[in-house]
Amino acid sequence: MERNLSFNLHVLTARLDRAADRILRAEHNVSYSRFVALTLVGELGASTQRTLADYLGVTEPSVSRMTAVLAADGLLDVQPDPAGGHRRRLSLTDEGKQLVASIQQGFEDRLAAFVAQSGVPYEEYAEHTARLLATFGRLEREAGK
């Protein structure tokens, strides 16, 4: 049973990611991975490319290419780090903030409808998801000690 649940979670996550990517490309002309990057920059504040690469689990050169595209699209501001070196500071432009907020609201509405269609009470889903995320956060903090 446990293996089956784990497999089902993997399949569900993959299907949600693909659906999100299709929606974002069709409605906003942005990939899911770029949306995740924008969301992380917005939630982390004025982050560095290195921090973003760590959060995404990708290389700095990969993040550098992604941030260049997002900056060219007017969604991300990339500036030299005042501390010097080759670091780049990242922040969302006003257009980037508006896009992230719009997408998040659209996803929330779609997810609520999807969960309701499944027969799972949305409030319970939201509560359990928050508890799982809090547990992940706690475990990551403990591992970092």
Image: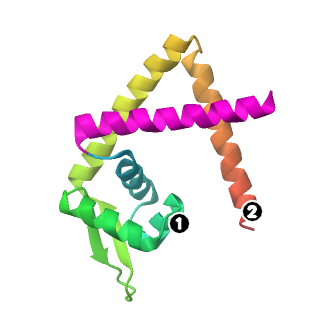
- Residue 51 in picture, x, y percent from top left: 48, 68
- Residue 75 in picture, x, y percent from top left: 24, 55
Where's the C terminus, which quadrant? bottom right
Residue 115 lies left or right of residue 73; in this view the side is right
Relative to 12, residue 117 above or below: above
Q: Residue at x 36, y 32 (%)?
A: 105
Q: Nearer the viewer, mark 2 or mark 1?
A: 1
Where's the N terminus, which quadrant? top right
Q: Amino acid at mark 2?
A: Ala
Q: Residue furthest right?
A: 1
In this rendered view, identify the residue nearer to me: 61 or 138: 61
Q: Amino acid at mark 1?
A: Asp
In the rendered structure, which disc, 2 or 1, sits on the residue that comes first in sequence?
1
Look at mark 2 in the image and give the residue it sits on.
143
Q: CA distance from mark 2 to mark 1?
A: 15 Å
Relative to 79, residue 26 above or below: above
Q: Which residues are magenta?
A: 1-29
- Residue 37 in picture, x, y percent from top left: 40, 55
**Most common SS among magenta residues:** helix
Q: Is residue 86 magenta?
A: no
Is residue 48 visible from the viewing direction of this image?
no
Asked where in the image residue 23 lies, by quadrant, the reply is top left
In this rendered view, identify the residue nearer to me: 46 or 51: 51
Q: Secondary structure at mark 2?
A: helix
Look at mark 1 in the image and give the residue it sits on.
54
Q: Secondary structure at mark 1?
A: helix
| Residue 82, numbered circle | none
